[in-house]
Amino acid sequence: MHDLVVDLIAVAVCGGVGGFANVFIGDSGLHLPTIEDGIFRPGYIGVVFVGIVAAVGAWLATQTSALTGNLTPSPPVTLRLSELSTALIVGFGGARWFKSEGETTIFRRTAAVAASRSANNEAAAAIAVGTPTEALSAALRMQ
């Protein structure tokens, strides 16, 4: 059981590292959880947490050992380097999905705000090329 806990921690760390690497892609940056313009932004803590959960969940799904109710001995749990690299990738991918869901929410809010305001070419240009939060800020500044 001790080896399983050590393996689980190693997979979680790799998933967290994968999630943390994702923090620097896009406009998120290194910030704590916050609410901006009525939108919850989970910050690096949320992204790392999702990376950990995704990696651990994916790794546990591949394990065949039984924890309880086993009358015959289970094969020992072994952690391979390929599983650690997979944990990094799954952590990164899970965090990317999570960030994409947040950006989708921001873009929907941007579209709703912009549609309710008068046409503004300057704001339209800022929305077209800006990050999701920059686009929402531009829409909120529209008259």
Image (cartoon, rainbow, N blue to C red):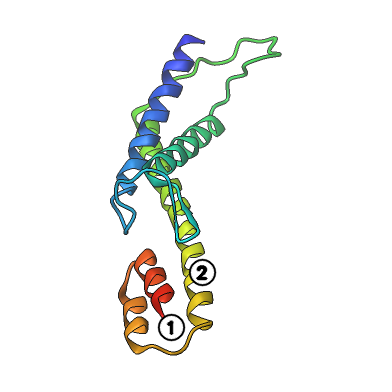
Neighbour tally class for label 2: few under 14, some 14-19, many 20 plus, Cα within 10 Å: many
Q: Are marks 1 and 2 in contact (CB under 8 Å)?
A: no
What residue is disc 2 on?
Answer: 109
* Image position, residue 59 (x, y; %): 49, 32
Above or below for 92 versus 1 = below
What residue is disc 1 on?
Answer: 143
User: What element does badge 2 sit on?
Assistant: helix
User: What element does badge 1 sit on?
Assistant: loop
Neighbour tally class for label 1: few under 14, some 14-19, many 20 plus, Cα within 10 Å: few
Q: How far apart are the alpha carbons under marks 1 and 2? A: 16 Å
Residue placed most toward the observer, 15 or 48: 48
Please give the name of the residue rendered at 42% of the width and 47% of the height, measured from the top-left corner.
Answer: 95
> Total marks drawn?
2
Q: Amino acid at mark 2?
A: Arg
Number of the front mark, 1 or 2: 1
Residue placed most toward the observer, 88 or 64: 88
Above or below for 87 versus 31 = above
Q: Tell whether 68 sits left or right of 122.
A: right
Above or below for 26 versus 8 = below
Q: Amino acid at mark 1?
A: Gln
Going from N to C along the chain, the mark reached first, 1 or 2, is 2
Please give the name of the residue rendered at 52% of the width and 70% of the height, measured from the top-left corner.
Answer: 108
